[in-house]
Amino acid sequence: MRIALFVTCLADTMFPAAAQATVRLLERLGHEVVFPAEQTCCGQMHINTGYQKDAVPLVRRHVRTFAGYDVVVAPSGSCVGSVRHQHAMVAAAAGDEGLAARAGDVAARTYELSELLVDVLGVEDVGAYYPHRVTYHPTCHSLRVLRVGDKPVRLLRRVRGLDLVELPAADQCCGFGGTFAVKNADTSTAMLTDKMRHVLATGADVCTAGDASCLMHIGGGLSRLHTGVRTVHLAEILAATEAAR
Amino acid sequence: MTRRTFLGMPGPRDGGPGEHPVTAPRGVGHLRGDESFPAAARKALADPQLRRNLAHATTTIRGKSARVIAELPDWQQLRDAGSALKADTMARLPELLEELEAAVTAAGGVVHWATDANQANRIVADLVRATGADRVIKVKSMATQEIGLNEALQEAGVTPVETDLAELIVQLGDDRPSHILVPAIHRNRAEIREIFLRAMPGVDPGLTDEPAVLAAAARRYLRETFLRTPVAVSGANFAIAETGTLAVVESEGNGRMCLTLPDTLITVMGIEKVVPTWQDLEVFLQLLPRSSTGERMNPYTSMWTGVTPGDGPQNVHLVLLDNGRSAVLADPAGRQALHCIRCSACLNVCPVYERTGGHAYGSVYPGPIGAVLSPQLTGVPDNASLPYASSLCGACYDACPVRIDIPSMLVHLRNQAPHPRTESAAMAAAAYTMDRPRLYAAAQRAARLTRLAGRRGRGLPPPLTGWTASRDLPDPPPETFRDWWARR
C-alpha cells in the first residue's frame, strides 16, 4: 500500500525519531511511504488557542497537500483529531464549503498510527522486539477524540521482550493541552505531577504514548526530576527489532 | 433571532447589525471573578488541605456515579434523548415560556419576567417586603447565587437563611460556594465543625466532627427556622410548560420544608429550565441523579403547580430570569450551554477542577460548564481567561448526561477572547511561516541552532517560562525529519 506520511510539525522539528520509526515500520511491513514535502502544520495550535482565522491557510495547505493520497498516516492522535474533527468546521466557518468538503474527504482517509496498523492493515504483531518494562499513557485525543481504544495496547502486547505494566488512572490528562501548559502552567504542572506519580508507581523504565506532544510534556517533567524514566513514542517501540540492536 | 418573542418581556432591543447581545450586567451577582483564572488557580493549588479535600470528594463521586451509570443498559440512548429534548426546547423557547406562563397563571401562580439580575433582585425583594417578613428561608439555588439575591435581600433589610446543609456551611463560613452540587466540597468535617462553633446560633459547644453530630446540629437550628419563617425562596430544576408545574430535586428534605411550610413561595428560575411535557421529566429524572450524586433516584422530588387551596404556600410566584441567556441562545455555536441540567458531572471528572476547585473560576458556575457558560452570560471579555481554563482533554464531554460538547465550545469561545498583542503577533508570524515550506524549514534550522547555543531546556523567555519552570525541553535533534528524508 502507498501511504502518505503526515509527519506533524512537532515530530518533524523536535521528534524526528518518531517519524523515522513510522517510516521504517511501515516499510518493514511491505508498504511504500511517501512524504509530501509541501506539508507543514495542521493548524491545531492556532485553532485551539483562538486563532481560527489564522489557521484557514494552514487547513487549505494541508488539504491540498494530502488530497491526492488514498491513505494518510500521522504518528499523533491529536493532529489526526484536528484533521478529523476541526478542519471541515474551520473551513465552513470561513465560508468555504468547497474546502470543507475536501477537508472531510482527506479526514476520512487520515489515520493515527495504531488505527492504520490495526484497522486498515489488519496487523497486531508487527514483529517488534523491545526488551523493556513499558507503561502506556493513552493520550486524551487518541482516547476521547479518535476513540482508538485498546489498539495501541494490542500492538504493544505482541512486542517480544516487552513487559507491559498498566498505568493507574491512565485516562487522566497529563496536563499538556497545547498552549494550556504555558497559559495555565501551575495547573498543568499539578496535573503532570500526578501523571508522573502514577508512571513512577508502575516501576516502568519507559513511558510510551501515541503523541509526541504529551510525551514531550511527561518526558520534560520526568527529566527535570531526574527520575531515570524515559518517554518513547509508540512508533519507535513498534519499529524496534532484534536485528536492529 | 429577535428578543421580542418573549411574552411580557420588557423593552425588546431590536438590534441592527453590530448591536451586542444583552449580557448579564456588571456590579451585581456572582458571574465574574476578581482575578484571572491562572492567578486564582495558583493560590488554590498552593492549599494542601483544599487539594486533599477536592481529590477525595471528586474521586468518591466519580466512582459512585460510574457504578450506577453502568447499571443502565440504555444510558447512551438516555443521553441522546436528553440532548434532543434540550435542543428542541431551545429551538422553541419563546413559545414554551409563554405556555408555561399561561399554565402557572391558570393554576393560581404569578409569573414575573426579569431581564437581568438587578430586575430579578428587585422583584423578589419587593415581594418579600410586601409580606412584611424580615427573613426568608432558601432552597439551594444556582440562579439566586448567580444574581446575588442574598446580598440584595440583606440590603433590603431581609435576612436570607440557606437551608441546604452545604449552602448553610458556606453562608455561616462567610464563604463562597465552590461546586454546583456540593457547594462546600472544599471543606472537610473538621473545618465544618469549626464554622458551626463560630457562627451557628445556639450551637452545642461540645460539638464533635462526626457527620451525624454535625447534621443533627444543623437540623436543630434549621427546624426552628422553618417553623418561624413565612416566606421561602427557591430555584427550580425543571418547569413543565404544559402544566405549569415546577420541580426541585434534592437530597436532604430541607428543600421540601421550604417548599411546603411557608405561606409565600418565590421561585427564581433561568428561562432555559423549561421542559415541554411531563413525560420529558422521565428522561431527566434518570439522567440527573446518576450523573450528579451517583444515586439511582434523588431522595426528594418536590413538584408544585400553582396554588392548592388550604395546602402548602398560598402565594406562589415564579420569576423567569434571562440575565444573558437570550444572548447565549442567539449564538448557534454556544447555545448548547443552555442545555445544562446542573448535574456537575463535568466538574467531578475535570482534571483542572479537581486541582483548583471552584473558587478559581470566579463565577458561581465553575468547572468545564462554568468555563463556557460564565463567559457567554457576561460576554467573553469579562471572563476572558475562563475558556482557556481547560486542557481540552474531553472528559467533560464524555460525562455530560445531555452531551454538551464543551471542548468544542471552549475552542469556539477562545476566538472571542481578547488576545495579548505579543501572542497575536507570534501566532500570525507562525501561520505565515507555516504556509511557506521553505521559510518553515529555515525557521526549523534556526530554532535548532538557537537551542544548541543555549543551555539545555531551561530559561526560555516569557511567556514560555511557564514551560521551563517545571519541565525540561528535549535536546534538539541532530536534524529535522524533512532534512533526514531529503538526504535519504
Image (tube, coloured by chain):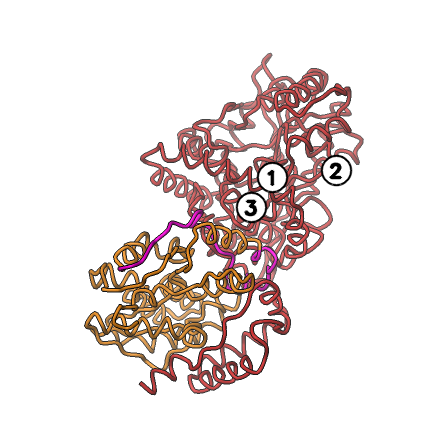
Chain colours: A orange, B red
Q: Nearer the viewer, mark 3 or mark 1?
A: 1
Q: Is residue A233 magenta?
A: no
Choose the circle earlier in sequence order: 1 or 2: 1
Q: Does residue B138 show up? A: yes
Q: Is residue B310 above or below residue B61?
A: above
Q: Residues within 10 Å of mark 2 (few under 14, many from 20)?
A: some
Q: Which residue is mark 1?
A: B53
Question: On the same chain: label 1 and label 2?
Answer: yes
Q: Is residue B447 above or below residue B342?
A: below
Q: Which residue is mark 3?
A: B354
Q: Which residue is mark 2?
A: B151
Amino acid, disc 1: Asn
Amino acid, disc 3: Glu
Q: Residues within 10 Å of mark 1 (few under 14, many from 20)?
A: some
Q: Is residue B88 above or below residue B251?
A: below
At horizontal 21% and vertical 64% (from top left) the residue drawn is: A121
**What residue range appears in magenta?**
A160-189
